[in-house]
Image (spheres, rainbow, N blue to C red):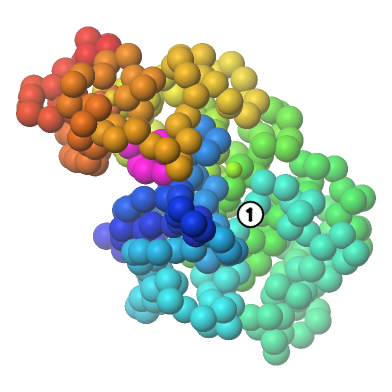
Amino acid sequence: QPWVLDVQDLTVQYLGDRPVTACAEINLRLARGEILGVAGESGSGKSTLITALTRLQRPPAATTGGRIVLHDQDQQVDLVGLAEEELRRYRWNTVSIVLQSAMDALNPVLRLGAQFADVIRAHEPSLRTEAVLDRTTELLAMVGIPANRIRSYPHELSGGMRQRAMIALALACRPKLVVMDEPTTAVDVVMQRQIVRQILRLRRKLGFAVVFVTHDLSLLLELADRIAIMYAGRIVEIGSAEQIYHRPRHPYTRGLRDSFPPLHAPLTTLTGIPGTPPNLSRLPSGCAFAPRCPEAIDDCRSTRPVLRQIGDQQAACHLYDDDRAAADRDPAVVG
Ligand code: SF4
Ligand code: MG
C-alpha cells in the first residue's frame, strides 16, 4: 500500500544535565490520505512529536534517534539529518503544519493574500501574480472564507476564520501530509465540528494524509481513521478509531475514553483515572502508567511492557503477555 510517512524508532529528548526523553521509540506508518489521530494528556509527548515530525523543534529539544521518512513521487527522504535549507524544500510542499493558535502562526502585519503569496511563491517562484491570486481565492473558498478577505489582516478575522485560513495556507502547495497540533482548541465546539467536517471534505478532495494531535479523544472518533494513544512519551495503544472506542485494550485508553465526552477543556486530571501523569524526568521503572492503573499486576512495576500485536490493534500492557485468549477477552471483563 502506498505510504507517505514512515516514522522509525523516533526518540526526542530535552538535552541538559539530565536529558529528559519526551518521545521514545515512536513507530508509525501513514498510508496515503490516511488521518491518524494522536491523543493523550498534556505532557504525554504529543506536541513534541508534532514539532519533531516537521523538524521545527528548537534546543534544548533534539531528535536523538530514529528516522522520519517521507515518500513523495517515488522519492524517499529521511528528514532527520537534513540541513535547514534542505528541509525548506519539503516544508509546505510535502509536509505542512497547522498549529494550535493561528494567531501565532500567521504574520500579524501581513494581509492574508500576501501570506498566501509568500508560501506559494517560495515553491513556485515563476507563478504569475494572477495565478497566485486565483490559487489563494480557491484555497480560501475551500474553507468557506470569502474572496474579499484576501485583503484582511489576521486580527480582522474571527478565531474560527483564522484557524480555517491556517488550514487553507497549509494546503497551498498541495502537501502529501498535514500535521495538526490541536488546531481546534481555541475555537468553540460548534466551530470545532465545522472544522473537522471541513478537514474530512478537503482530504477526500485533495487526498493528503493528516497527523492530528489533541487531548480530545471524542473529536478524533469523528475525524481519524486510526488513533494512537500516547502516555509518558510512548505510544501505548494504536488501532482503528472503532477499535479504540469500542475495544480499547490498554487500561489508560479505557480511562481516556471514559473521560469523554463531556468537555473540551484541557485535561489536567482524568475523571476516569485517579492521579496525574508522571514527571518525565522521574519515570517509574516498569510500566509508566502503573501508579495510576486499576489493573496493575506485579510485572507492571518491574518490566516495561512493549507495544505488541493484539488482534489487529497494538497495545503495550502486561495484561496481554502470555494469555492469548486475553486478546479476545471482552475489555469490560478484563476491567
Ligand atoms: Fe496497567 Fe500493568 Fe497494563 Fe501498565 S502494564 S497498563 S500497569 S496492567
Ligand atoms: Mg500541546
Left/right of residue 147 with respect to residue 222 in the rendered view: right
Magenta stretch encompasses residue 35: no
- Quadrant observed for ligand 1 in the rendered image: top left
Quadrant of the image containing the N terminus: bottom left
Q: Which residue is mark 1?
A: 98
Q: Position of residue 231 (x, y in %)?
A: 41, 36
User: For this rendering, which residue is in front, 99 or 247?
Assistant: 99
Quadrant of the image containing the C terminus: top left
Residue at position x 23%, y 27% in the image: 300
Region of the chain picked out in magenta, as a range? 228-237
Left/right of residue 181 with respect to residue 320 in the rendered view: right
User: For this rendering, which residue is in front, 44 or 124?
Assistant: 44
The quarter of the picture where residue 4 lies is: bottom left
Q: Position of residue 64 (x, y in %)?
A: 40, 64
Q: Taking 61 as reference, is 215 above or below it? A: above
Q: Position of residue 18 (x, y in %)?
A: 46, 53
Can residue 38 be seen at all in this image of the molecule?
Answer: no
Residue at position x 58%, y 26% in the image: 267
Q: Taking 275 as reference, is 87 above or below it? A: below
Q: Position of residue 261 (x, y in %)?
A: 55, 18
The quarter of the picture where residue 243 lies is: top left
User: For this rendering, which residue is in front, 163 or 318?
Assistant: 318
Q: Amino acid at mark 1?
A: Val
Q: Secondary structure at mark 1?
A: strand
Residue at position x 70%, y 89% in the image: 126
Q: Main secondary structure of the magenta part?
A: strand
Magenta stretch encompasses residue 235: yes
Total tally of numbered discs in the picture? 1
CA neighbours of label 1 inside 10 A, class few (<14), some (14 to 19), many (20+): many
The quarter of the picture where residue 71 lies is: bottom left
